[in-house]
Amino acid sequence: MNKIVIIGAGQAAAQAVASLRAEGYSGALTLVGDEPFAPYQRPPLSKAYLLGEFARERLFLKPDSFYAESNCELRLGVPAKRIDSQAKKVELADGATLSYDRLLLATGAEVRKLPIPGGALKGVHYLRGIADVDALRPQLKPGARLAVVGGGYIGLEVAAVAAKRGVEVTVIEVAERVMARAVSPTVSTFYEKTHREHGVKLIMSAAAKGFEGADAVTAVATNAGTIPADVVLVGVGVVPNIALARDCGVTCDNGIVVDEYAATSDPDIFAAGDCTNHPAFAGGRVRLESVQNAIDQAKHAALAMLGRPAPYREVPWFWSDQYDLKMQIAGLAHPGDVTVLRGNPAARKFAVFHLRDGIVAAVEAVNAAPEYIVGRRLIAARAAVTPDRLADISIPAKSLA
Amino acid sequence: MPKIKYIEHNGKEHTADVPVGWTVMEGAVKNRIPGIDADCGGACACATCHVYVDPEWFPKLPPRQDMEEQMLDFAQELKPNSRLSCQIKVTPALDGLVVRTPKSQH
């Protein structure tokens, strides 16, 4: 085997380049990305980079010299158009063809577009890449009215940054609480309160029906009334980029389906990161949108591509920065979990543990790093801890593991 | 530009020019210095950028904030001069700073 092609230029792709070389792969290596940038960090985009506190050059995951020294050819700004899995070739938008022995799909995800009228009006923004933030930032002027459609991580992080910049922010959320897909009601309630304290208006159980305006957006129509807006940010989730995989016959189902070795249904094609539907730590299958998954799955994909497969079994972890709050999550909560509150949200430092059949399955920690780290260890060990013990703050977090 | 010296656990030294305003972690990552993974990119969320600050320099740094203190409490091979390098901002006064990376991060 002497030709590996990576499609995608995000966190998983950068990790795969590093891991393939670190594991001794010495053949040709090409990375294909549709954005004109070498792999960069996405998490700061909705945080420090949007705020303007973080220069663009700081976003890049590796220095340019890394790719040169890793003997990795970069084909940036050139989307891959088609995979011919029989001939083992990738066709690029510029007409070039790359042949491969092994192919890694690290195609990531793209924003889910709201299928409502007015989406093409000026001032309606989405946030996924550097260019999106560069377009949005100048609109967040003091006194401007920002409507955020979607109270998930991206929407709330943008709301926090905008509020800090003196923007009048209204968040429109279709569910009855914020981050409903990701966190427990206790955490949602706490974040709702915090946002309101910073002057952010939250409108819950409200569906956006359309964007109004002649040329530029002036309002968002919802079933709970019309929200005037000078600028709109839509953050209603992402969809995995599966078209290349699906069109060449690779099995897809809510993502590119891979096994615990990051192998797809094609023996020469592997996949890692946001684009995959993979076996979950606690059983079942899952598609994750996270740095942790991109890094860890890419490491396993690299090993599998080199013929040394090792199962991917890491505990998922996530974080979100809003105002001066750091939320850290480990594991995946399920709706039927028993939840245990440790600490007091009023003290702005607390954690919610999730127990499934008595076993610690997830933890959401707000300004509570010890609980997060201990939670991660308990989850990895599939440890049973009683609710009384978890809730007892007279027992130091460290002693829970 | 301030120069930061990074010393690996095996004694191998690397000196890097790190722009003011960047973190000591970023200086290491952008210069491909081994032993500092920084999976979370500097969000103080992963504790994979643990360093030992040279004892002479340690008192000259702004003290650890609460979050860093909490994360470090769980670091392997914790020492009194341990810091998370993502929380050390480079200033002109830190020209010549010396940090060492722990064995467990290699």
Image: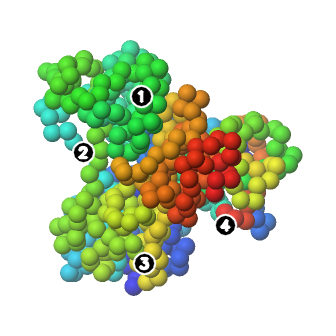
Left or right of A380, for residue A279 = left
Specify the amino acid type for callout 3: Ala
- From the viewer's perspective, tell me whether residue A62 is left or right of residue A270: right
Give the mark, 2 or 3, whose residue is nearer the N terminus.
2
For label 2, count other residues whose C-alpha is less than 10 Å away and answer few (under 14), some (14-19) or many (20+). some
Q: Which residue is mark 3?
A: A304
**Residue A108 visible, this orientation:** yes
Residue at 58 percent of width and 59 percent of height: A377
- For disc 2, the chain is A
Question: Viewer-proximal residue, A255 or A302?
Answer: A255
Chain letter of the residue beneath label 3 in the structure image: A
User: Is the residue at mark 2 from the same chain as the one at mark 3?
Assistant: yes
Q: Residue at x 58, y 43 (%)?
A: A391
Q: In this image, B85 relative to A375: left or right?
A: right
Give the spatial CA distance, label 4 vs label 1: 41 Å
Residue A297 badge: none
Furthest toward the top, the residue is: A143
Query: Residue under circle 1?
Result: A192
The N terminus of chain A lies in quadrant:
bottom left
To which chain does the residue with label 1 belong?
A
Please state the horizontal and vertical placement of residue A171, each as a whole percent of the image: 33, 27
Classify residue A55 as left or right of residue A182: right
Q: Nearer the viewer, mark 1 or mark 3?
A: 1
From the top left corner, tell me how far across and down residue B57 is, in percent.
83, 44
- Residue at the disc numbered 2: A112
- Vertical order, A261 against A7 (above or below): below
How busy is the neighbourhood of tag 4: few (under 14 within 10 Å), some, or many (20 plus)? Answer: few
Residue A100 sits above or below residue A81 on the image:
below
Chain ID for label 4?
B
Q: Residues within 10 Å of mark 1 (few under 14, many from 20)?
A: some
Q: Nearer the viewer, residue A383 or B6?
A: A383
